Amino acid sequence: MNQENQVLLQKRADVGLWGIPSGHVEIGETVSEAVIREVKEETNLDVRIEKLIGVYSDPNSQVFNYPNGKTVHFITTCFLAEITGGELKCNSDESLEIKFFGQDNLPEDLLTMHPQWLEDALSKKEAAFIR
């Protein structure tokens, strides 16, 4: 989120849908390091992790079918991060567009698992969710 409490989303090139910037942990990397790296790669922004929003593994929301036929069951850790530097720029061939959205103006074409993550992040609860 930025200082105006807008949510940063990316339109993914692989599926053409909006979602939270995301990625995977590289070998030898911590989850925190992966978050910082992925955000930088995809948005050109520097971030500091503020808190864990939740851990998500429910097959009803975490199984995704890619257009190429591949099906994946994701286990996701979602974090709230503060922007500390950089200039917003679509850096990655993984993204079609990067944009901030007001909380009441989120795009309808979100990845299926992301609405729950956004709802939890915007709830401002102190404890992390396990879903």
Image (tube, rainbow, N blue to C red):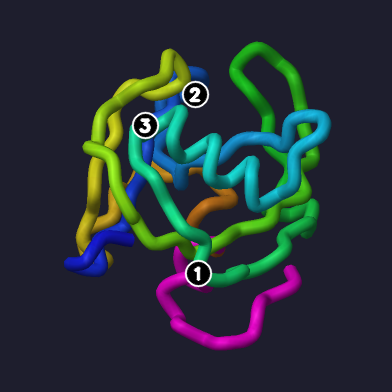
Residue 11 drawn at (x, y percent): 37, 31
Query: From mark 3 to mark 1, how far is it between C-alphas?
Result: 24 Å
Q: Nearer the viewer, residue 40 or 124?
A: 40
The residue to which callout 3 is attached is 11
Please provide percent x and percent y for residue 93. 43, 14
Residue 110 position in % (x across, y down) = 42, 44
Q: Looking at the image, which residue is at 34% across and 41% down?
A: 45
Of circles 3 and 1, the one toward us is 1
Task: State the extent of the magenta-drawn residues as a range.
Answer: 117-131
Disc with the residue nearer the chain's start (3 vs 1): 3
Looking at the rendered image, the quarter that the C terminus falls into is bottom right
The amino acid type found where label 1 is placed reads Glu
Relative vertical location of residue 71 with respect to residue 37 in this rendering, above or below: above
Residue 73 x %, y %: 79, 40
Q: Is residue 101 above or below residue 66?
A: below
Residue bearing the label numbered 2: 15
Q: Nearer the viewer, residue 30 or 129?
A: 30
Secondary element under disc 3, as helix, strand or loop, is: strand
The secondary structure type at the circle numbered 2 is loop
Whether residue 51 is situated above or below residue 21 in the rendered picture? below
Which of pointers 1 and 2 indicates the residue nearer the eye?
Answer: 1
Task: Report the disc number at residue 50.
Answer: 1
Q: Amino acid at mark 3?
A: Lys
Kindly indicate whether the residue at mark 2 contacts the one at mark 3 (C-beta within 8 angstroms).
Answer: no
